[in-house]
Amino acid sequence: MSTPSTAHARIRRAALPPLTALALTVLGAAVAGPALAHGDTLNVVITGQRAGHVTADVTWENDGDAVEEAVAATVNAVSADGTRTEGPWKLVRDPGRAAGWTTTETLPAGTWTVTVEAGFPSLGRARKEVGVPVADPAPTAGAPTPASPSAPAAPGSSAPPAPSAPPASS
């Protein structure tokens, strides 16, 4: 005959696997809950570029809601002639747009085939041709152009007048 403590030990051992399975199921549902509420696929749309930074919108494919959690996605680009590549770069949150993401790195001027591949919180992929224009250099506050040596000094200027040619001798 078994003692009461031995009987309790058997009951605890018998109950442990189902309780462990239940705990793991509840934990798994809590972690996957937000993603499953939106579906299991991300809709990634490359929206273009801003000053060479690739821009994209990342939403849930089933309902179009913006992805609120962190997104693990990489950006790669290949030049139109296939001779240059950029990336992999990661997407970071674009604070100005709810569904917006961008890169911290910039693409050089040219036409690029850009690919964004997301792996978390779900899978998503996009590819688009993006053009980055040649940026004109910003005008600088340059020094004033020097006056020609034969030009008269401006009134009120402290510069001495330009020397005149000596008189011609006869």
Image (cartoon, rainbow, N blue to C red):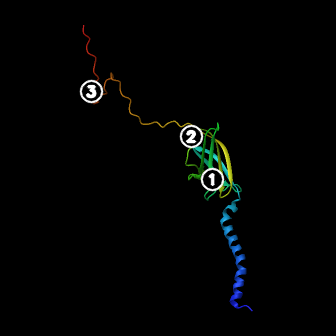
Cα distance in 3D space between marks 3 and 2 = 50 Å
Amino acid at dot 2:
Pro
Return the disc, 3 or 1, that comes first in the chain's sequence: 1
Q: Residue 161 is drawn in which quadrant?
A: top left
The image's mark for residue 160 is: 3
Label 3: how many Cα within 10 Å (few below 14, some 14–19, many 20+): few
Label 1: how many Cα within 10 Å (few below 14, some 14–19, many 20+): many
3 or 2: mark nearer the eye: 2
Tell me which residue sits at (26%, 11%) in the image.
168
> Which type of secondary structure does the marked residue at label 1 adopt?
strand
Position above or below: 99 against 81: below
Q: Position of residue 9 (x, y in %)?
A: 69, 85
- Compared across the picture, whether 165 is left or right of 69 comes to left
Q: Position of residue 46 (x, y in %)?
A: 64, 47
Q: Position of residue 98 (x, y in %)?
A: 60, 54
Position above or below: 28 against 142: below
Cα distance in 3D space between marks 3 and 1 = 67 Å
Amino acid at dot 1:
Ala
3 or 1: mark nearer the eye: 1
Quarter of the image with the C terminus is top left
Quarter of the image with the N terminus is bottom right
Return the disc, 3 or 2, that comes first in the chain's sequence: 2
Mark 2 near mark 1, Cβ–Cβ under 8 Å?
no
Q: Residue 4 is drawn in which quadrant?
A: bottom right
Residue at image mark 1: 73
Amino acid at dot 3:
Pro
Tell me which residue sits at (49%, 36%) in the image.
137
